[in-house]
Amino acid sequence: MQLQEFSSWTPEVWGQPPLEEWRNKLRSVCGRFNPFGQEERGFVNGGVVLRDAAGMEIVQVATDVDVVRRAERDIRQDYGEHFFLLVQLQGVCGVEQQGHQSIISPGDCILVDSSLPSNFFFNGQFSNHLSVHLPRQLLLSEKPNDFEVSRRLGAEDPMSTMLRALVAKMLQMPSSHKRSGELRQLLLQATRQAFAADPPDTPLCPKERASGRLEFARALVDRHLTAEWLTAQWLANRLGVSMRTLQEDFSAVGTTVTSFIRDRRLRLAKDRLLERQRGSDGGTIAEIAYSSGFNDISYFNRCFKRAFDCSPTDVTRR
């Protein structure tokens, strides 16, 4: 299958960067991912290219390594701030996350959560895909926000066709274009609908292991981030554990429940401020703070300055 809308992004000949150089470039734009295979040969057929598309980052990843992994220890050092919308252009890629396995071919789309361990299998065969970096909190800020990660959306699926068309359009539009903000919002909403999970028939139950509870707790925080009733106690009750157990789970990764909730809300506020800075109608700074889960603007300003070493006003003026 030849994707005509992306023909200009599929060169006939790729470079052969050293494996270490390719890995470092991948990490610099996507986070801590570790390639395996081709160590003896020492180089990779392909490349990693970062593009600005209507104000959103899109990374083209071409490679012929055996596998690329992102383990729990990588996430502890580099917590995922994005969901990755992958559009396969050439070759095939096997994707594994949360026990789900899919093989994507040209034209297929798939959603990957960078906050969860993942494996990408290439088996030494050339593969080329686009990875659209969707800001985590912006994608989760509206319903539906419970997604089926690692679920293949076939090339023939109308939703896949729409997602590819939106990505192709964004690649043609500079961030300064007056319609770029609307196009970003359209892609976020289309992604929510395309990968929305069906409601479970039975209530979700936390896993017995601390790592399983922590994974579930993070998901609950992200899905209910702006709710005024989201507190450490509510989270413990929802998980069916004591406050002490919940605090111990978060302490094991170097934070507290309250700090984690606050930091995720700050990230959402910053993403919304950046959207406002790019020209989208995001409201005043106070409105953004309140809609992100803060009810005290002075407290919000202090926390924001401490977290990002700049004020909310500084962000909107950049």
Image (cartoon, rainbow, N blue to C red):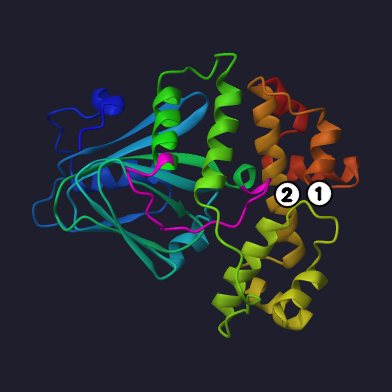
267 falls in the magenta region: no
Q: Is residue 29 visible?
A: no
Lower position in the chain sequence, tag 1 or tag 2: 2
User: Which numbered tag is attached to residue 265?
Assistant: 2
- Tell me the CA gap for discs 1 and 2: 6 Å
Measured as percent of width and height from the top left, residue 154 is found at: 34, 48
Task: Report which residue position mark 1 lands on.
Answer: 293
Q: Nearer the viewer, residue 103 or 234?
A: 103
User: Which numbered tag is attached to residue 318?
Assistant: none
Helix, strand or loop for disc 1: loop
Q: Looking at the rendering, which quadrant does residue 311 occupy?
A: top right
Residue at coordinates 57% horizontally, 81% vertically from top-left? 207
Q: Looking at the rendering, which quadrant does residue 170 occupy?
A: top left
Is residue 60 left or right of 162 when viewed as pictured?
A: left
Region rendered in magenta? 140-158
Question: Contact (CB < 8 A) between labels 1 and 2?
Answer: yes
Is residue 139 left or right of 99 when viewed as pictured?
A: right
Which amino acid type corresponds to the residue marked 2 in the rendered image? Arg
